[in-house]
Image: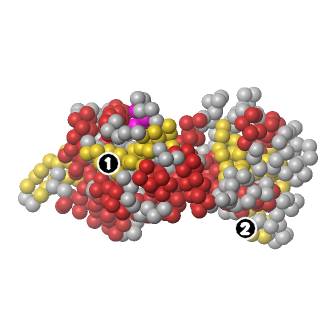
Amino acid sequence: MPNIHHHKILILDFGSQYTQLIARRVREIGVYCELVPYDVSSHFIENFDPSGIILSGGPDSVNDEKSARAPNIVFDLEVPILGICYGMQTMAVQLGGDATSAEKAEFGFAQIRARNHSKLLSGINDEINSDGHGLLDVWMSHGIEVTKLPSGFELIASTDNCPIAGFANQKKHYYGLQFHPEVTHTKQGIKILERFITNICHCEKKWTTENIIDDLLEKVKVQVGKQKVLLALSGGVDSSVVAVLLQKAIGDQLTCVFVDNGLLRLNEGDEVMNTFSQNLGVKVIRANAQQYFYDHLENESDPELKRKIIGNAFIDIFNREAKKLKDVNFLAQGTIYPDVIESAGAASGKAKVIKSHHNVGGLPEDLQFELVEPLKELFKDEVREIGIKLGLPKQMLFRHPFPGPGLGVRILGPVKEEFAEILRRADHIFMEELNNFNLYDSVNQAFAVFLPVKSVGVTGDERRYDYVIALRAVETIDFMTARWARLPYDFLDHVSNRIMNEISRVSRVVYDISGKPPATIEWE
């Protein structure tokens, strides 16, 4: 079995919103990488033994006295280095160059000219100008620029506004790029990163789905042995993939507990049981706890308190079911790599947290289990690919995000069983028609929201006051920002009519046209 961790790239995070994209691109190329705060210990970096190092962008000004710097050991290891945006600037300053505020800041598309036939950029271009020079369409995001090259460096890229848009010390294999090759707006970005990783760092492409699965199965078998494992199965992507992975590795040593909280999508509980218990042969205990959750949520309107109530109720039910089982030694969780990244942070506190979670729950404190977290090195897209290889339905793996508290945070105000049923049906109609109109995959997240207000409507010749459903659909790349989806009017008209005709307690349907920011994607 190939060693998928033998060649690896270390990414030092200086707080850029794009940093996780760097890691995902490296993985897509087929090489393992880890993303750590820029101020991680020298001991860690040395023990990691990287084949190459990437310094990310960041929000700091490199001229600030207390701005972030790369640990000195980075330049002592004699491995290739790629500095991106802020990473290029701090590399320049730390190695004897200079960087100052740019006369003209660059935010958005730019065209660079490659220079001096560097190993990094030579032969990579989007077009050739009349003078025979290679040009690249790239994405810039900076107000600081390098103004003086460190000793031993040469110019490898420039723009009309940024004379030093790239530099290199080709003897040491040090490179800096002011633009962002990790974003899709830089058309040849993946080729540039691949050139650095494979040609300059000499990494072999062993990080493949098949190799990852083999590695995970072997690790689970070694860790668990002949002992029993318990998994909280939610039906979401991460726990579902963990379930099928563990089933393949250890068979009937695995028991899953599925807590049906009454806040799931239409028929979701039955679908989970059918997929795992009947079709995949996974041992699943279904805890029907709908009323328990409704009782605890009664009269509570505060969104954060609702989350806590749902999380604590989940722990109570899971704890109750777990105590019925005998001789369980391990607790499996669907922790994925972004969870690990976001829980780490920088020792200085300067690394910015990219994203907060909508997940709830946690480990019951009195359950003394050893953790099994087979997905903790993987990004969500890698988890999905593994799920497909292991036979999970594509529609389960590629559904739009669903919050951990479920419909509990899509019912504004108090949560009642009646409200949950109305919302469940409305949301189902919305999803069904998005698929019927071939629009589901054109938006990144879509859902319905129950509003605890009544609006006048007309049914036949009678006036009535009933509830309002809001529809939300957004387009986004990273879920940090989003724009409302411009869905066709005839589609919205059709969905609205279906909801109001088929659900008697709904008298009005509205469409949310708020962007993020200033709004959030979810309503609570």
Badge 2 amino acid: Asp
Residue farthest left in this picture: 461
Task: Tell me if residue 421 is in the magenta stretch.
Answer: no
- x%, y% of residue 149? 87, 45
Q: To which quarter of the image does residue 65 belong?
A: top right
Where residue 405 appears, x then y in whole percent?
Answer: 36, 42
Residue in front for this viewpoint, 289 or 252: 252
Q: Name the dominant secondary structure of the magenta segment.
A: loop
Disc tally is 2
Looking at the picture, does residue 367 appear above or below residue 164? above
Residue 490 tag number: none
The residue positioned 58% from the left and 61% from the top of the image is: 209
Disc 1 or 2, which lies upstream in sequence?
2
Residue 126, numbered circle:
2
Structural crowding at the residue carrying mark 1, measured as other residues with C-alpha within 10 Å and reported as few (<14), some (14–19) or many (≥20): some
Q: Residue furthest right?
A: 152
Could one spot residue 445 in this view of the protein?
no
Q: Is 109 above or below relative to 326?
A: below
Q: Is residue 383 visible?
A: yes
For disc 1, the marked residue is: 285
Magenta stretch? 360-364
Amino acid tagged 1: Ile
Task: Residue at 78% x, 70% y: name it.
Answer: 128
